[in-house]
Image (cartoon, rainbow, N blue to C red):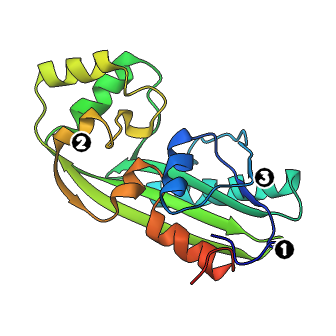
Amino acid sequence: MPLDPVRPPLVLASASPRRLELLARIGVTPDRVLPVDLDETPRKAELPRLLAARLARAKAEAAAAEAPGTLVLAADTVVGVGRRILGKPADEAEARRFLSLLSGRRHRVMTGVCLLRPDGKRSERLVTTILAFQRLTEAQIGAHIESGEWRGVVGGYQIQKRAEAFVRFLSGSHSNVVGLPLFETAQLLRGAGWLRP
């Protein structure tokens, strides 16, 4: 909830409907949604957490350039298995490979969150959640692929949907795995004077 009517407009630099839904849970409705088109290819030897932070910052800066005088919120979520980064599967075969890799082992979901103020001041958080999937059968993987829930999401699964039944262990923020860590995001917005304390 805003402090006063003269607050700067809040811009969400994301095309993700999940992030809009998550913000609504804490009473935040952006004044504008401004997706930015960036090359999200990891740099050589770039670690998953560094990629998440770099892309969140780059999205915020790109949106701020298009919408000066606004408060820009940007985020980027990365799934990491060791040093390996799992992006959005290109096709069913890659989604199947991702699920096979995640089967029976731990992985990390990292989200970089960046809030860029109209004066250029930047506040950032990097949130990591650790998860472990059960060992998946071929039938479970096949059913997940058939559901289509792997499309357009990093790691090839959505924890808020059927894949939650695969999770035998989770340490950290659940909303982070969906795409936006709400506790940390609310902290950033309060620090900028956009939310009531």
Residue at screen point 57% across, 63% down: 113
* Local SS, label 3: helix
Label 2 or label 3, whichever lies nearer to me, is 2
* Vertical order, 107 against 97 (above or below): below
Left or right, 94 with reference to 131: right
Residue at screen point 89% across, 60% down: 68
- Residue 60: mark: none
Residue receiving disc 3: 63
* Local SS, label 1: loop
Q: CA distance from mark 2 to mark 3?
A: 33 Å
Is residue 45 visible to us here? Answer: no
Residue at screen point 43% across, 18% down: 91
Q: Quadrant of the C terminus?
A: bottom right
Instruction: Decide which of 77, 47 is in the foreground and name it.
Output: 77
- Residue type at numbered disc 1: Val
* Vertical order, 146 against 105 (above or below): above
Residue receiving disc 1: 6
Residue receiving disc 2: 164
The reply to whether discs 1 and 2 touch (Cβ–Cβ < 8 Å) is: no
